[in-house]
């Protein structure tokens, strides 16, 4: 009989040799600062792009909700976990995204793994951007549909694959990140939406890193007029755990699609509702974005300050990758920044393709311009010149 511990130990040793073993480090965040291993570091590794996770209004809303509704939802939403705050959050999300309705899931990961199998199945076709988030790939696999990957952001390749494989399949879905989580670039949504129309397919965009950050906070479907109407991107998914600073995932879509999710998406049906405090905090964050869209433009402005200082392609979102190659080099680069007082986590395979390990810089509204310029200078002198 195989020993389970033996299996785990061998696997871990192999990962260690390839510098791919990961371990969560205890981190205490205070605003843009992170304390770990007794050191206080300026963090560029947090997706809290608007710093709302610790904003006085989101915190106050969460506390008030705990006092009113308690800590946990107590059951799935179809049982008794559907506390009244959900209605307000879903109405607000739909308004921001210009859709009829919205449905909130337990997380962004749960959203995609629920949405995709609810709209396509074994007789169907899915085209996925090769660099889409792991949860889109997982949702595609779970659906049982025939999956084809198209080259990153290459709508011509997506068109070739549709021309080859669309016939004979009942339904077709094109699924992509809106803003790519490890690259920071934006999907060609207008071109994909046009392809979807021509090939009778549906388009799903996961705007986890666009909501609250691009197009006045409305997200990537609104860049370059891609969503002239909500029907251009009929499945607008995302998460409440990045710029919104809370937790949970969502889908904004037509009323009938949302009704279908509520009755068929397995991750909606078979998982407990979100804690009321989290939902209340997300509502407060949406309020803040609506009241001050100029603030929502700040993370992108900061990211562009960084790309200009380093002569990199202009940032399209709050995320800027600096690709260094192998996993060891990425870890060494991260250590150099740590020794200079910055926290920038090395991103290694399988999160990114082999040979493209990188530093992933995430900019937030509250980073100081002077610190960004100093960071860029250190990257130029100690990382890019090596
Ligand atoms: C593009 C994308 N989709 C989904 C997720 C998952 O979201 P969540 O953390 O809410 O599960 C992430 C974040 O990790 C992401 O980057």
Image (cartoon, helix red, strand yellow):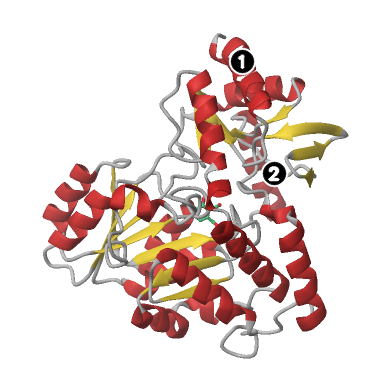
Where's residue 70, x and y in %? 79, 80
Labels 2, 1: front one: 1
Q: What number is the disc on residue 377?
A: 1
Q: Is residue 204 above or below residue 32?
A: below
Give residue 200's quadrant in the image. Answer: bottom left
Identify residue for label 2.
9
Of residues 294 and 315, which is closer to you in this image? 294
Q: Is residue 64 above or below residue 77?
A: above
Left or right relative to 248: residue 259: left
Where's residue 235, x and y in %? 36, 66
Left or right relative to 36: residue 311: left
- Residue drawn at point x = 17 percent, y = 55 percent: 162
Where's residue 311, x and y in %? 46, 18
- Residue drawn at point x = 24 percent, y = 71 percent: 123
What's the CA distance linking mark 2 and mark 1? 41 Å
Residue 164 shows up from this direction: yes
Q: Is residue 263 above or below residue 129?
A: below
Left or right relative to 11: residue 300: left
- Quadrant where the N terminus is found in the figure: bottom right
Where's residue 242, x and y in %? 59, 53
Q: Is residue 156 above or below residue 52?
A: above
| SS label for mark 1 | helix
Give residue 230's quadrant in the image. Answer: bottom left
Q: Within 10 angstroms of label 2, few (less than 14), some, or many (20 or more) residues?
A: few
Q: What number is the disc on residue 131?
A: none
């Amino acid at each position: 009989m195989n020993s389970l511990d033996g299996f785990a130990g061998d696997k871990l040793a192999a990962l260690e040799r390839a510098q791919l073993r990961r371990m969560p480090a205890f981190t205490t965040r205070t605003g843009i600062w992170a304390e770990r291993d007794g050191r206080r570091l300026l963090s560029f590794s947090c997706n809290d792009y608007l710093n709302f996770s610790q904003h006085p209004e989101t915190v106050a809303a969460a506390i008030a909700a705990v006092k009113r509704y308690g800590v946990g939802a107590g059951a799935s939403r179809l049982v008794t976990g559907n506390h009244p705050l959900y209605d307000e959050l879903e109405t607000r999300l739909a308004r921001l995204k210009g859709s009829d309705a919205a449905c909130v899931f337990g997380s962004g990961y749960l959203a995609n793994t629920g949405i995709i199998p609810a709209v396509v199945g074994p007789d169907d076709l899915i085209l996925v951007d090769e660099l889409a988030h792991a949860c889109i790939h997982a949702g595609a696999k779970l659906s049982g549909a025939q999956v084809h990957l198209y080259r990153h952001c290459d709508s011509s390749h997506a068109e070739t694959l549709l021309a080859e494989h669309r016939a004979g399949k009942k339904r077709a879905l094109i699924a992509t990140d809106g803003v790519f989580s490890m690259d920071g670039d934006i999907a060609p949504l207008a071109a994909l939406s046009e392809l979807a129309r021509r090939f009778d397919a549906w388009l799903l965009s996961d705007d986890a890193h666009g909501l609250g950050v691009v197009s006045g906070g409305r997200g990537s479907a609104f860049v370059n007029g891609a969503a002239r109407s909500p029907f251009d991107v009929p499945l607008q998914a995302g998460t409440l755990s990045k710029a919104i600073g809370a937790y949970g995932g969502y889908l904004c879509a037509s009323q009938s699609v949302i009704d279908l999710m509520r009755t068929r998406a397995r991750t909606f049906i078979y998982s407990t509702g979100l804690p009321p405090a989290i939902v209340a905090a997300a509502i407060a964050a949406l309020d803040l974005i609506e009241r001050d869209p100029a603030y929502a433009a700040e993370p992108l402005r900061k990211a562009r300050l960084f790309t200009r200082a380093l002569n990199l392609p202009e940032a399209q979102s709050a995320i800027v990758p600096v690709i260094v190659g192998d996993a060891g080099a990425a870890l060494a680069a991260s250590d150099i920044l740590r020794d200079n007082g910055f926290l920038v986590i090395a991103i290694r395979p399988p999160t990114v393709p082999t040979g493209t390990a990188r530093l992933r810089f995430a900019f937030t509204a509250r980073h100081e311009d002077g610190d960004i310029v100093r960071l860029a200078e250190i990257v130029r002198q100690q990382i890019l010149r090596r």
